[in-house]
C-alpha cells in the first residue's frame, strides 16, 4: 500500500476511524489494516482487534468517505449453565435461545454494486460468494443496502466444515444476525425474524424466549436433544440484543471436534483440545450423571481421542500421507479456479481432483494435505524423540 501512505486516502481514513494519522500509518505498515487482493483490493480488513474495532472488520471508500462492515464479535462460552446464564443476563426476564449451527461464519452484504461473502477474518471467499449469490434472495440487498446478513453456511459441500446433519443437499445459508453497516448494531430477535421471514431466508432454529429463572434447566433439555442428533448446541441471547450472547455446546459436538483435532494432532491447537476435554468434566458434574452415564461419557471421550490417533498413526506407518477431504459443488468451473487461487494464497496445500458432473453441476473433491502431522508421525516411526 506504500504509494498511498501519504495520500489523501490516509487523511480520509483517519477522519473516518477517528484514529490519529500516525496510528493509521502504523496499522498499515504492520499489516494490521491490510488490503484484500485482486479484484477486491479496494477492501481493507482489520487483521486483529484494534481499539474496539472487531477483528475481520472491513471497510471501503464510499461516496466521499468510507463504509464499514463490522466483524462478528466472539461469543463467550458458558462452561456451566447455572448460575452463569442468570448472572450474565441479570435484569432480563427472558432469554432467547437459538440453535448454534456448525458451519462457516460469513457476512453477506452489498458492496459497490456487488454481493460479497466475507469471512471471519475479512477475506472474500470466491466460492462462498458464488453460493450466496445463487442461494439468497438478493432483492433484500436492493431494498436494504445498509444492512448485513450474518449467516452460517452449512451442508456437505461446505469446504471448510462439511456436515451432513442438517438435511441440506449442497449448502445453505442460515441467517442468525442482521446488522447495520458502520455501527454494527444488531436487530432485536423479533425484528430480525420478521425481516428474514419476509425475504424467505433460512433462519437458525429458534427455541423461544425462556424465563431467565428456568433457563438453565430448559437449556440442558434442549442441548441433550440436539446432541442426540449430533447438532452443536445453543446460543443464548438477549431478545433486544443489547447484552452479549453466550454459547453452550453438546458433548457430541465436543467429541466431534476432538475426533478431527486428534486425527491431525500436530496441527491442532493445544488450547482447542484441552478446552474441549475440560468442558466434558464440567458437564458431567453439572448434569449430575450417575456411574453408568459417566462410563458412557468416558468411552465416548476416550474413543474420540484414541480412534483418530490410532488411524492416523497406522496410516503413516503403512507409508500413507494424511489428508483431509473437502468438497465443493459449482455451476461454473471458473469458481473452482478462483477458489484454488484463493486457498493457495493462504499457503494451504491442496490437490483438486477432476470434476464429476452431478445434476448439471460439477462436484470437486479437494484434498488438503496435513504435512505437519504426517511428518511428525513419520519421524517418530523412524525413532525420533518427541
Ligand atoms: P465455534 O464455532 O467453535 O464456537 P468460533 O471461534 O467461531 O468457534 P465464536 O467466536 O464464539 O466461536 O462464534 C460463534 C460461532 O457460532 C460463529 O462462528 C457463528 O457463525 C456461529 N453460530 C452458529 N449459529 C449461531 C447463532 N444462532 N447465533 C450466533 N452465532 C451462531
Ligand atoms: Mg462454528
Image (cartoon, rainbow, N blue to C red):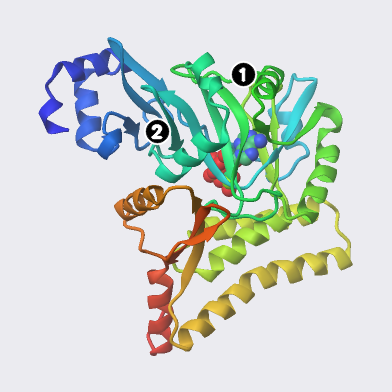
Q: Is residue 333 left or right of residue 314?
A: left
Residue 72 in the image: above or below residue 269: above
> Residue 142: x and y, percent?
50, 17
Q: Earlier in the sequence, mark 1 or mark 2?
A: 2
Quarter of the rendering containing residue 124: top left
Would you name the residue on which mark 1 appears?
A: 187
In this view of the protein, can residue 35 be seen by the observer? no
Viewer-closest of 9 and 89:
9
Quarter of the rendering containing residue 149: top right
| Secondary structure under the numbered disc 2 in the rendered image | loop
| Secondary structure under the numbered disc 1 in the rendered image | loop
- Total labels: the figure holds 2
Q: Give me the residue at 45% from left, 38% from top.
A: 129
Pick out the residue farthest to the front. Answer: 360
Residue 42 in the image: above or below residue 326: above
On residue 84, the disc is none
Would you name the residue on which mark 2 appears?
A: 49
> Residue 93: x and y, percent?
80, 20
Viewer-closest of 47 and 244:
47
Residue 382 in the image: above or below residue 20: below
Q: Give me the residue at 40% from left, 43% from top.
A: 126
Q: Is residue 222 left or right of residue 21?
A: right
Mark 1 or mark 2, whichever is nearer to me: 1
Q: Is residue 47 left or right of residue 239?
A: left
Q: Are marks 1 and 2 in contact (CB under 8 Å)?
A: no
Q: Give me the residue at 58% from left, 40% from top.
A: 152
Amino acid at each position: 500500500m506504500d504509494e498511498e501512505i501519504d495520500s489523501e486516502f490516509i487523511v480520509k481514513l483517519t477522519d473516518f476511524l477517528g484514529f490519529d494519522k500516525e496510528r493509521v500509518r502504523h496499522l498499515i505498515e504492520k499489516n494490521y489494516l491490510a488490503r484484500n487482493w485482486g479484484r477486491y483490493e479496494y477492501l481493507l480488513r482489520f487483521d486483529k482487534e484494534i481499539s474496539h474495532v472487531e477483528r475481520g472488520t472491513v471497510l471501503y471508500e464510499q461516496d466521499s468517505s468510507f463504509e464499514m462492515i463490522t466483524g462478528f464479535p466472539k461469543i463467550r462460552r458458558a462452561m456451566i449453565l447455572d448460575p452463569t446464564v442468570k448472572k450474565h443476563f441479570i435484569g432480563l426476564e427472558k432469554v432467547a435461545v437459538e440453535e448454534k449451527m456448525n458451519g462457516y461464519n460469513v457476512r453477506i452484504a452489498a458492496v459497490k454494486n456487488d454481493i460479497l461473502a466475507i469471512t471471519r477474518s475479512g477475506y472474500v471467499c470466491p466460492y462462498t460468494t458464488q453460493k450466496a449469490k445463487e442461494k439468497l434472495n438478493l432483492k433484500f440487498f436492493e431494498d436494504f443496502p445498509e444492512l448485513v446478513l450474518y449467516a452460517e453456511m452449512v451442508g456437505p459441500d461446505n469446504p471448510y466444515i462439511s456436515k451432513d446433519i442438517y438435511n441440506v443437499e449442497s449448502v445453505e445459508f442460515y441467517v442468525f444476525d442482521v446488522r447495520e453497516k458502520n455501527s454494527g448494531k444488531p436487530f432485536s430477535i423479533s425484528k430480525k425474524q420478521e425481516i428474514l421471514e419476509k425475504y424467505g431466508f433460512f433462519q437458525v432454529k429458534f427455541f423461544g424466549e425462556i424465563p431467565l429463572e428456568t433457563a438453565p434447566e430448559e437449556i440442558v433439555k434442549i442441548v441433550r436433544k440436539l446432541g442426540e442428533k449430533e447438532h452443536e448446541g445453543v446460543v443464548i441471547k438477549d431478545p433486544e440484543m443489547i447484552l452479549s450472547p453466550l454459547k453452550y455446546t453438546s458433548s457430541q459436538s465436543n467429541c466431534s471436534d476432538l475426533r478431527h483435532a486428534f486425527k491431525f494432532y500436530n496441527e491442532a491447537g493445544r488450547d482447542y483440545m484441552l478446552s474441549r476435554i475440560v468442558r466434558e468434566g464440567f458437564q458431567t458434574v453439572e448434569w449430575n450423571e450417575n456411574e453408568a452415564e459417566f462410563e458412557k461419557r468416558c468411552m465416548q471421550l476416550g474413543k474420540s481421542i484414541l480412534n483418530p490417533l490410532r488411524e492416523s498413526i497406522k496410516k503413516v506407518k503403512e507409508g500413507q500421507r494424511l489428508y483431509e477431504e473437502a468438497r465443493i459443488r459449482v455451476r461454473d468451473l471458473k469458481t473452482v479456479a478462483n477458489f484454488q487461487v484463493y486457498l493457495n494464497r493462504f499457503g494451504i496445500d491442496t490437490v483438486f481432483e477432476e470434476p464429476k458432473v452431478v445434476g448439471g453441476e460439477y462436484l470437486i473433491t479437494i484434498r488438503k494435505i496435513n504435512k505437519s502431522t504426517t511428518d511428525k508421525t513419520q519421524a517418530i516411526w523412524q525413532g525420533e524423540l518427541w
